[in-house]
Amino acid sequence: MKTIDILAVGELNVDLLLNRIAGFPEVGKEIFAQDMTLTLGSSTAIFAANAATLGPRVAFVGMIGRDGFGELVRNSLRERKVDVSCLIEAEGAATGLTAILNYGNDRANVTYPGAMSLMGVKDLDPAVIAQAQHVHISSVFLQEQLHKDLAGIVRLVKRCGATLSMDVQFDPAETWEFDCAAILPYVDVFMPNEQEIMAITGKDSVDAAVEAILPHAHVIVVKMGTKGSLLVTPEGRKQLPATLNENVVDAIGAGDSYDAGFVSAFVRGKSLEECQRIGNLTGAVNTTAAGGTGAFTSLEAVEKAALKHFGQKLGL
Ligand SMILES: Nc1ncnc2c1ncn2[C@@H]1O[C@H](COP(=O)(O)OP(=O)(O)O)[C@@H](O)[C@H]1O
Ligand SMILES: [Mg+2]
């Protein structure tokens, strides 16, 4: 008997938001911010928190430091009903942090990756993975060691008997080093957005990019913002338009919320087309409230928002 429905493997950090700053920071000067928020950041954490809200039993494997920010990460995940018993405390590295300076409609971000860059295949306990029905890996370029070990990690997951999904996310170095032939045969559902699938393959259209990876991949889901998503299976392709939100609050975490809906439906044994419908819907619900988790305070809140804004039943 498996005790975990979804095991999220990925990056953890805190976001320090400095808002309403008096001007853009200049070297050698000091200015005030009128407002500050310190909160759980990271794409994998948004995925895990929102998937747990949707119902599945979600656990997290990620690396934090032995420090106050690590405690904040642990407590925030726990509040969202994510099992944090498998978080790893790094020896001699601090919890990662992104400082976000908001100035008017613009922002400048500085990230200190810290502990998140250290987690590799040697840190993943096969006994924990064996407890999971499904593993979701995300933000593969942000995590230095995980990126290096990725081919070994996906093989380990399959040896442990779990199904596997993967969202690559952006590559800050923009080298997009990703060995499709070594990795994708082990990934049951590959979930990039359109920019990412084109960057990985070096192609200039989604169609060409899909053609390029198809020989290695199983199911591919391409997230396409306001255009919705493309589902590619051995049976064929289905483009599903977005359940469009005309009053977007912000789109932070829309892709992670799409993943949370799709994967939650997948582990419940729904058809791939139903997984896609639910992913589109949870991605859209994400845009109705601020930040990546604002719309996912409870299952009832998600169901209500889905019905009110998009006239659809969540169906999970
Ligand atoms: N304005 C919007 N209205 C409705 N749904 C949206 C909107 N923006 C995004 N979505 C949904 O969220 C999904 C993920 O968003 P996208 O921006 O493609 O991902 P990412 O955040 O990874 O770039 C989309 O595939 C779509 O289904
Ligand atoms: Mg994304």
Image: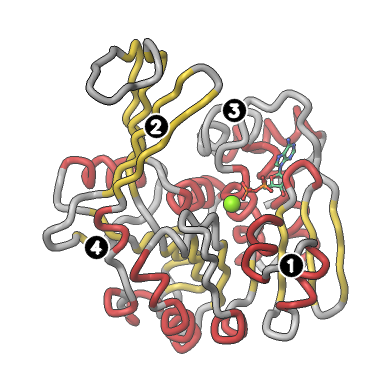
Q: Earlier in the sequence, mark 2 or mark 3?
A: 2
Image spot of residue 101 (x, y percent): 39, 27
List the residue tagged with mark 1. 203
Mark 2 or 4: in front is: 2
List the residue tagged with mark 3. 289
What type is the residue that disc 1 sits on?
Answer: Lys
Mark 2 and mark 3: Cα distance apart in space:
19 Å
List the residue tagged with mark 2. 100
| Residue 72: mark | none
Q: Earlier in the sequence, mark 4 or mark 3?
A: 4
| Nearer the observer, 205 or 295 | 205
Instruction: Find residue 92 and report its image quarter.
Output: bottom left
Mark 4 and mark 3: Cα distance apart in space:
31 Å
Circles 4 and 3: CB distance less than 8 Å? no
Instruction: Find residue 197 and report its image quarter.
Output: bottom right
Say which quadrant the N terminus sits in. Answer: bottom left
Mark 1 and mark 2: Cα distance apart in space:
32 Å
Where is 52 relative to 273, above or below?
above
Mark 1 or 2: in front is: 1
Label 3 packing within 10 angstroms: few (<14), some (14-19), many (20+): some
| Side of 29 where 10 appears, left or right | right
Mark 1 and mark 3: Cα distance apart in space:
34 Å
Residue located 30% across and 67% down the image: 119
What type is the residue that disc 4 sits on?
Answer: Ile
Image spot of residue 280 (x, y percent): 73, 48
Helix, strand or loop for disc 4:
strand
What type is the residue that disc 3 sits on?
Answer: Ala
| Nearer the observer, 207 or 129 | 207
